[in-house]
Image (cartoon, rainbow, N blue to C red):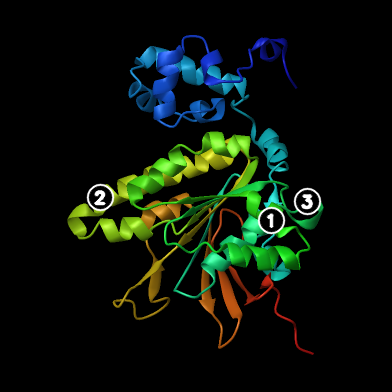
Amino acid sequence: MKTSKDEEKPKYLTIESIPGIGPVTARKLRELGFNTIESLAMATVRELEQAGIKDKRAFEIINAARSSISLSFVRADELLKMRRNILRLTTGSRKLDELLGGGIETQTITEFYGEYGSGKSQIAHQLCVNVQLPPERGGLGGGALYIDTENTFRAERIVQMAKHLELDPEEVLKNIILAEAYTSDHQMFLLENSDKIIKENNIRLIVIDSLTAHFRSEYLGRESLAARQQKLNKHMHKLIKLARAFNAAAVVTNQVMSSPDVFFGESIRPIGGHIVAHTSHTRIFLRKARKGPVRVARLVSSPYLPEGEQLFKITENGIEDVEEEG
């Protein structure tokens, strides 16, 4: 229930409309990747200091932005009601959706990891198409931002999937914003400056395929591990801020590495260590089931869902269920 005090709070539409932000400061903030009120609301005082804004003023600016988009403390019962507004995006497979509690959740990070050919990029492509479906068909009625770090995006594959769902392939392609990242710093830069694109293009899905490829190749040796993890941590937290600010689904794919010292259990593990593990809310391990299109998806961790496995298949049509025998 809104109070009269809440109703009196001003609503700012642009960062320049916040008192104390002039043209020069606005330009500096945009250079740092703060293009919208939502991004400022998720900022820290230390981040705004880089624009030459002193501590007290930075705190006031952040608070003004937060009050404008109604971020506040809430009771747990109110939080439960708010969570009912969280949306879910279908994967294209009913069984895989069941494993995920109804589909890919907005405002959180979902991570798919596995070996080469396990289907990570195929799922990412399918989600870029599915997000454009109306809610009654399991979509979010919006566009997708696809940050490609390994040159895996294929427009031809999108066309195949769109045709199968009886969508106009040209329109589907228009609603996917592609950004190729050439280094880990470039990858971080693209995400940090994406808030305006997300807002203007009604982006409801943010994909990074793959999250760790550049970090893995550029930061070699144990001596560079701390620097790599620090950057990955910043990158992941920016992603979750964007997902929450715009009620979007965030999906990352991840590579794996072998653990020869493991004698029992899974001998391969995802790149990124505890930083990626703790920031990804839902983690799914993908592997080939047998020869052919069938894959196994195992839910490894989730804040509230039980571990489990489901089969799905990758066909010319995209992600589909495996027909049950008998």
Q: Quadrant of the N terminus?
A: top right
What amino acid type should be assigned to the residue bearing mark 1? Glu
User: Residue, x 34% and y 57% (percent of image)?
Assistant: 214
Is residue 252 or residue 325 the one in the foreground? 252
Q: Taking the image as drawn, is residue 105 in sight?
A: no
- Compared to residue 51, the image places residue 228 above or below, namely below
From the top left corner, tell me how far across and down residue 31 is, in percent: 40, 28
From the top left corner, tell me how far across and down residue 159 is, in percent: 66, 64
> Quick check: 186 left or right of 321?
left
The single residue placed furthest to the front in the displayed view is: 170
What amino acid type should be assigned to the residue bearing mark 3? Pro
Judging by the rendered image, the residue that carries numbered circle 2 is 226
From the top left corner, tell me how far across and down residue 321 is, in percent: 71, 75
Separation of disc 2 and disc 1 at Cα? 44 Å
The single residue placed furthest to the left in the displayed view is: 223
Q: How crowded is mark 3: few (under 14 residues within 10 Å), some or many (20 or more)?
A: few
> Quick check: 67 left or right of 134?
left
Q: Earlier in the sequence, mark 3 or mark 1?
A: 3
Judging by the rendered image, the residue that carries numbered circle 3 is 134
User: Residue, x 30% and y 78% (percent of image)?
Assistant: 260
Q: Residues within 10 Å of mark 1 (few under 14, many from 20)?
A: few
Q: Which of marks 3 and 1 is in front?
A: 1
Q: In which quarter of the image is the C terminus?
A: bottom right
Q: Is mark 2 on a helix, strand or loop?
A: helix
Q: How crowded is mark 2: few (under 14 residues within 10 Å), some or many (20 or more)?
A: few
What amino acid type should be assigned to the residue bearing mark 2? Ala
> Quick check: 224 left or right of 214?
left
Separation of disc 2 and disc 3 at Cα? 43 Å
Separation of disc 3 and disc 1 at Cα? 17 Å
Judging by the rendered image, the residue that carries numbered circle 1 is 170
